Structure formats: structure tokens, C-alpha cells
Image (cartoon, grey):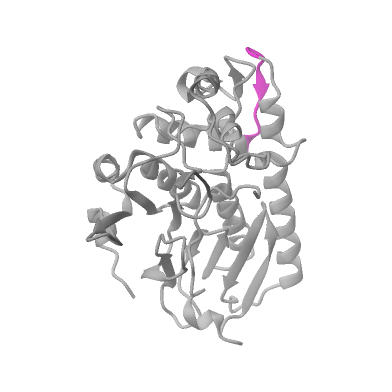
Amino acid sequence: MTALSRRSFIFMTLALAACKRGAADLLLSGQTMGTTYTIVAVEPRGGLNKDALKTAIDAALQDVDKKMSNWNPTSEISRINALKADTPFFLSADMLELLQTAQDVHDTSDKQFDLTLGPLIDLWGFGTQKPTGRIPDSAAVAKAMQFVGQSEALTLDGNTLSKSHDGTQMYLSAIGKGFGVDRLGDTVRSFGVTDFMVEIGGDIITSGKNAEGLPWQIAIETPDARQRSFLKVLGVSDLGMATSGDYRNYFEHDGTRYSHILSATTGRPLTHATASVSVLTQNAMLADAWATALLVVGRERGMEIAERQNLAALFIDREITSGKMRFETYATDQFASIQPS
């Protein structure tokens, strides 16, 4: 289990031409947040100090880790999780922004986007501890649920946060990676670069066009654990994008598959037919959060919420026909307006 891995991967062509040797002016990649990052950019006419950019990127990633990583015991989120009940904690500006965004998505997603699932995530073996492969009993689930519920367990007052229970634990896996993507995008933009794509573990922000003057070419993966293939390729400019899926991070017990995507209502892994949701919106943090929220509620209710929020969302459902599994796609009106490249 790696840090911030609660996201299916979006396979990318990296702007197709940008993958070709010499087709892009800048290609940076490395390790971060328990996964990888990639930056592809077209160098501005005035030139670019690439060494200074790399230094700034490293500093930005270290800062995000210092604040958002559940796998860093001294991070801001780890210190929040260690708080006793009713103890005010003064938030950094970045954490305040993240929590306000998370609360907005929580309030508009039938409260199914919930950062306080930590006790359940640990119980089911999808957190910082190694998976046990065992199914927790109903009593253990009920006990963990006592500390879950973002609206009731967290109080945000100005720039301070307090918890209602000592045992309330937040995981930022469904929003922190998107925050990191946006931070890297801001860093690249501060060097005068206007045409770039930034990706961390499948969460993406795009700006402008690729080296061939086309929108950045982003491929959405077929949600099939047995193989990796592309289902759809989109041309994306000036948007954040994220996909949440149930098919990479799971365990099996007695022939049943248990996904890492948990319901804030039942405290158990999802059982509906929706396998993945991709969302495009104004930044990667929002796309990250909404992709998870819509996957949790499932396609039927998720389509209603996404249309109401004017989100570009693509739902992929598993359907069994004549004993064979196939995948069906369902797009919101906003997503349908995005033309494939």
C-alpha cells in the first residue's frame, strides 16, 4: 500500500507528440506522494531556467508532503489526527483551502464525500497499515463509524479546526493529490510557462496546448483489473482532470472482491455497478474530490448530482450480458460537449 494511492490511474499519451524524442521542450518526472509525477511543457519564447524550475518543483512537493501526507508522521494532517477532542488547531492557508473545498463537496454530494473515513480505512486495511485481507465484523464497523461523519466530527471556525472525538481521523487521499497537482501547475506557471500538463498518479492539470499546437491528449483507462487498455481519448486544455475507480486497490476474500472505496453510510466497500468516474473541472483538487464523491454515490444518483453541479463527468458501469462482463459509459451533458481528439 502506498501513500495517496486511492485513485485509479489515467493512462496518458502525454500529448502524443510530446512523448516523442525532441517533440517537447521539457519533460520532468520523479517520485512523490507514494506515486510518480510527470510534467510536460512547451518552453516559452523567452527561454526557461530549467534547473531553477526543477528546484522550485522539488520545494513545492516537499511543502505539500509536509502538510497533506498521512504517511508523514510530522505532517500537518498527522498532527490534526493526533489532536484530542475540542482542541483548536490553527490551520495553514493551504489546509484551510483544502478543507473548505472538501466541505463544499461533502455538502453537495449527499455527504458521501467524507474526509473522516480514517477509522474505516484503517479497519479495512487500506490505510497506513498493511492490508490484513480479513473482513471486519459488524461490531468493529459500528465502533469505527462512531468517529465518522465530516459534518458532525469536524468544526471549522475561521482558520481553526477542532474535532468532536479523539478517534476521528482524516485521510486526504481523495483530494490531497489533486491539491499537489494544482500547486505544481502554479509553480510551472510562475516561470512564464503557459503550455503544460502536470500529472501526479493520474490526477492532471492542463494549460494551453501541446508541442504540436493541439489540446493535451488524455486517455481514460478501461476499468478492468485484468488488463490495461484505453477506453477514450480526450483533447483537454485549461482544465483539471481526475478518475476514481474501484478496480486497482482491493483485496479478495472467499471469492468476493472488496474495494478500497468505502461508503460513509454503511462503512463498507461499495457494491454498485459503477466501476470508475472521470471528472473534468477548473482545477485538479476539485476534480479529485468530485471523482471520488460521484463514484461513492454511483451512476444513477451521481448523474443527477453532476448535472446539478454542471460537472463534466463520465461514468463507467460494469454490466453482465450472457455471462460476460462489458463496460457501458454514461456522460453528463457537460462531458458530452468535450469532443474526442
Looking at the image, is 73 positioned above or below residue 227? above
Residue 157 appears in the figure: no
- On the rendered structure, is 30 left or right of 11? right
Q: Position of residue 287 (x, y in %)?
A: 44, 49
Query: Is residue 89 located in the magenta-colored stretch of the structure?
Result: yes
Q: Residue at x 63, y 42 (%)?
A: 131
Q: Position of residue 288 (x, y in %)?
A: 47, 48
Q: Report the predominant secondary structure element of the magenta stretch.
A: loop
Question: Which of the 4 image quadrants contains residue 215?
Answer: bottom left
Q: Position of residue 191 (x, y in %)?
A: 64, 65
Nearer to me, 164 or 17:
164
Nearer to me, 298 or 336:
298
Q: How many marks?
A: 0
The outermost residue toward the front is 254
Nearer to me, 11 or 313:
11
The outermost residue toward the top is 86
Query: Is residue 183 located in the magenta-colored stretch of the structure?
Result: no
The quadrant the C terminus occupies is: bottom left
Residue 149 appears in the figure: yes
Q: Residue at x 46, y 43 (%)?
A: 289
The magenta region covers 85-93
Question: Which of the 4 image quadrants contains residue 157?
Answer: top right
